[in-house]
Amino acid sequence: DAVTYVSPDAAQWFADHDVSIVGADNPAVERTALPGKLPPLHEVLLCELGMYLLEMLTLREPALAGVTEGLLVVAPLRITRGVNSPVNPLLIV
């Protein structure tokens, strides 16, 4: 299977459409940058727009089942000032 990443050019579209969370079924949502450098989409979404990123979502099964809409419930761990908390996303269809 080919891996598809979200392009940094998508950041403006996300901002224009009031997106609050971006999820993908790959390990970084976008291609990773050089070591020690924040990937460009991460920099805009996390630092400038305050969006959340979900990585490694299992999206194949709902897509193959024909699911086109639903409610995604995501609850992070209750950690004060926590960042990058693991979550257990639940898709209700």
Image: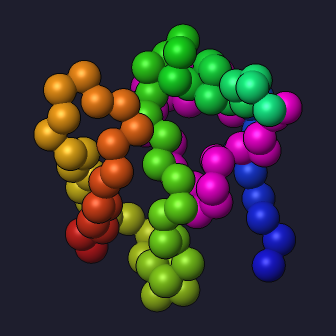
The residue sitting at 83% across, 71% down in the picture is: 2
The residue sitting at 78% across, 64% down in the picture is: 3
Question: Camera-side residue: 12 or 82?
Answer: 82
Q: Please, is residue 43 above or below residue 6 in the view?
A: above
Horizontal side of residue 81 vs 13, given as left or right = left
Q: Position of residue 92 (x, y in %)?
A: 24, 69
Regarding residue 30, the answer to whether it shows in the image is: yes
Image coloring type: rainbow
Horizontal side of residue 6 vs 45, given as left or right = right
* Start-end of magenta stretch: 10-34
The residue sitting at 64% across, 21% down in the picture is: 43
Give the position of the C terminus as an image quadrant: bottom left
Question: Camera-side residue: 51 or 9?
Answer: 51
Horizontal side of residue 81 vs 65, given as left or right = left
The residue sitting at 53% across, 61% down in the picture is: 56
Residue 14: say if magenta. yes
